[in-house]
Amino acid sequence: MGSGIFALPALLFAAAGTFSPIAILIFACLYGSVLAVIAKLSTVFRQSGGGQLYAEHAFGPAVGFQVGWFSMAVNMAGAAANFHVLISYLAAIFPFFDDPVIRLTTIALLIAVFATISVSGAARSVGAIAVGTVLKLSPILLLIVVGFAQNGLPTDITLPTFSEFESIALLLAFAFSGCDVAVYAAGETKNPRKTMMRALFTNLAGVALFYALVQLAYSATAPDPSQVDIPLAAMGEKLLGPTGSLLVSLAAIFSIATFQINVFFLVPRLAYGMGRRGLLPHIFAYVSPRFKSPVVAIASFAGFVGALALSGTFEILAVLVVSVEQLGFLAVIGALIVMWRRGDAGLRQSMGARWLIIIPVALGYIAWLMSQLSPISLRYMVIMVGMGVALYTLSRGSAVRQEEIELPEMRDEVAAGESRG
């Protein structure tokens, strides 16, 4: 949960009214069909990379690079955009930050701070994320409790028309985007083949229920609809006066900052994994002997985010967040099907009849979202593919493959060979 929760309630309420909390839960189930595929593949691999790793194993390095490039580009654009949102909330409390020079200087300093936290190691990064999560959720939970106490639960539910429901499809897809990023750092997780699936679905359930509660409280409170850009601040002001608005602004700052720490910790691990497997120059695979973190990958990620944030050229990439994510999901679903047909890692024996429902639902959900995209988004998507091909060609010259993709049966064969020896 990053900045989306502070902007979506008014837009969802305008499109779906009192049905919006239910719409959130419906979309969580649809998104869950895609997440089930990622979760299933996470039980097979132990290495970092997520969808990029799965696509590389199933389709080869060229497709694997494209999926990794899409994931990194979207996350860099999102991180750059979020820094501007973060400074805007700071400026709402402290007008000092409205000065253009101060604004850009602060963004640069924040990027350096988040990169330093990520470089310092996994334990410190996860600790900072835990503290930030408490700070960002507490004020919003207070609003939910006060909202229900003052206004009760809304009981009148009006079903939206299908066209209205479609109009919020991409909004809800954006709200749930990123629920799968934990697999980027699977290689640094204890026993990822057992813990990742539980973590992914716990995360999805927590986000869906929290969003639905916020939306329900917003519907019950019915704040000023004209304040569409700051709906939770409007809700806070109606319930608690200026103090409520201030609490929401602080929660937004902590929320976006915590999300940025997540991004700076997880996404560079994707570049690190690609460096290890020869898809990026081998310098990306360098690990600090002191901090045990991929410092070059982190520094490079921070540099690109900084360039995008300070130049303002991230807008073009920002419109691709949902569309590119769907392309990555298609590659992951394709990887599961290919691995099932080949019998990799015992998937054919472990996948029951329920997958005859899960996979078509996931494909239908993605096709529906893709049908909602504007022509300009599709055009930019083609441009991104072309850029990925060019970058892949350039990277091959200085890449060194330091590790292969490992599946459980590969390790079993090695162990059996050693025991025979």
Image: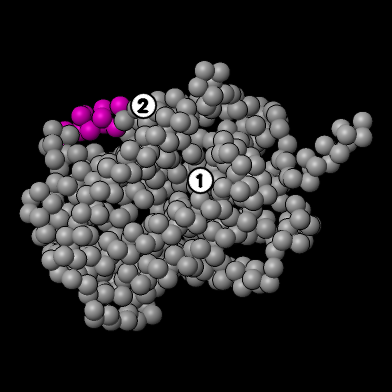
Residue 109 in picture, x, y percent from top left? 30, 27
Residue 277 in picture, x, y percent from top left? 67, 35
Is 412 placed above or below 16 here? above
Instruction: Say how many tags the image has.
Output: 2
Dot 1 alpha-carbon crowd within 10 angstroms: few under 14, some 14 to 19, many 20 or more: many
Pick whichever, 30 or 418, lies toward us.
Answer: 418
What scheme was used to colour the molecule? one colour
Residue 169 in picture, x, y percent from top left? 40, 67
170 sits left or right of 13 in the view: right
143 sits left or right of 297 in the view: left
Is 296 placed above or below 40 here? above
Pick whichever, 45 or 229, lies toward us.
Answer: 45
Which amino acid type corresponds to the residue marked 2 in the rendered image?
Answer: Ala
Residue position marked by numbered label 1 in the rendering: 182
Residue position marked by numbered label 2 in the rendering: 112
Residue 78 in picture, x, y percent from top left? 39, 45
The residue lying at 26 percent from left, 75 percent from top is: 18
The residue lying at 63 percent from left, 47 percent from top is: 193
When asked about the image quadrant of residue 308, the answer is top left
Q: Indicate the quadrant containing the C terminus: top left, top right, bottom left or bottom right.
A: top right
Is 220 placed above or below 55 here? below
The residue lying at 78 percent from left, 40 percent from top is: 411
Task: Determine if residue 230 is in view.
Answer: no
Local secondary structure at mark 2: helix
Q: Which residues are magenta?
A: 98-109
